[in-house]
Amino acid sequence: MKHYDFAVIGAGSGGLVVATSALRRGAKVALLEKNKIGGECTHAGCIPSKTLLNSARVYQAFKNAASLGLPVIDVAKDLQFARVMEHVDEVVQGIYAHEIPQVWQDMGIDVYVDLTGAQFIDKHHLQIGGEVIESDYTVIATGSSPSPAKKVGTGPLEYLNNENFWHLREMPAAITFLGGGVIAAELGQALARFGSEVTIVDRNPRILKVVDEEVGSLATRIFQEEGMRLITDSEVVACEALEGGKIKLHLEQKSGKGEMFTQRIFV
């Protein structure tokens, strides 16, 4: 059984900082991950979202070519959303090529990857796959996951989140984001620029509550100018799949109960 000074559960941005920092200070380190090194930032957050936003920004600029004295181009008829998403994946894989397990092994960090994840046997022993290791200290850096709204009815209902969203190859005609945080703002604006009907529902008085009010107000104005629908002081309490691919959302609002319809939901 191998013994380590530190075992780090989770190889996202937080876990990688802990593991490399401990290594530089002479510690023997084990890095445990159930998926891919890089975590949310590389595979489902920062890298793919900024790549998608950049493609949407360029697409938007093409639509405004006339205002720049350039020839008018009908970009909408030639938009291949699948190709856009494939480009995003190419960028992600390019980054991941520098984060594969062997890179960290070569640095001196022992890497364990198994889909079952890590489990505590006791305070100083962990199991991942068929391996059991011992560590003096364990750092848990496993991140978080979204909590979907309650489902009603018997129809099948698929939620999008910041992990399975990147598997899309067909652009949603209409999509509703449950919550108005940074992820909803980024992906919502990108999809709206590509032509989706985008709605953000937030329980707070404004979207982007985590940023300064002035920044949030500016973003709100720009989003609305670009055709996004923002519903605040409202919460989706249940989702119901209907025939024809529609989804009915049940809302709790200050004015009482409400409802709306969409094609896809993102939590």
Image (cartoon, helix red, strand yellow):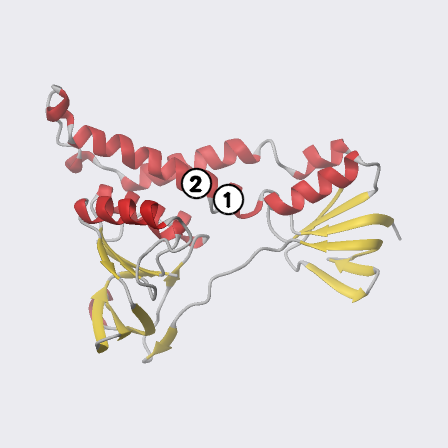
Residue 123 screen position, x and y as percent: 82, 64
Residue at image x 36%, y 49%?
168
Label 1 and label 2: CA atoms lie apart by 7 Å
- Say above or below: 138 vs 13: below
Numbered disc 1: secondary structure = helix
Query: Looking at the rendered structure, which numbered label has been put on residue 198?
Result: none
* Amino acid type shown at disc 1: His
Residue 77 screen position, x and y as percent: 15, 37
104 left or right of 255 in image: right
* Amino acid type shown at disc 2: Pro
- The residue that disc 2 covers is 48
- The residue that disc 1 covers is 43
Marks 1 and 2 close (CB-CB < 8 Å): yes
Residue 169 seen in the figure: no
73 left or right of 87 in image: left
Of 227 and 88, nearer the camera is 227
Badge 1 crowding class, 10 Å Cα cut-off, few under 14, some 14 to 19, many 20 or more, is: many
Badge 2 crowding class, 10 Å Cα cut-off, few under 14, some 14 to 19, many 20 or more, is: many
The image quarter containing residue 60 is top left
- Say above or below: 59 vs 8: above
Residue 146 screen position, x and y as percent: 47, 62
Residue at image x 51%, y 35%?
93
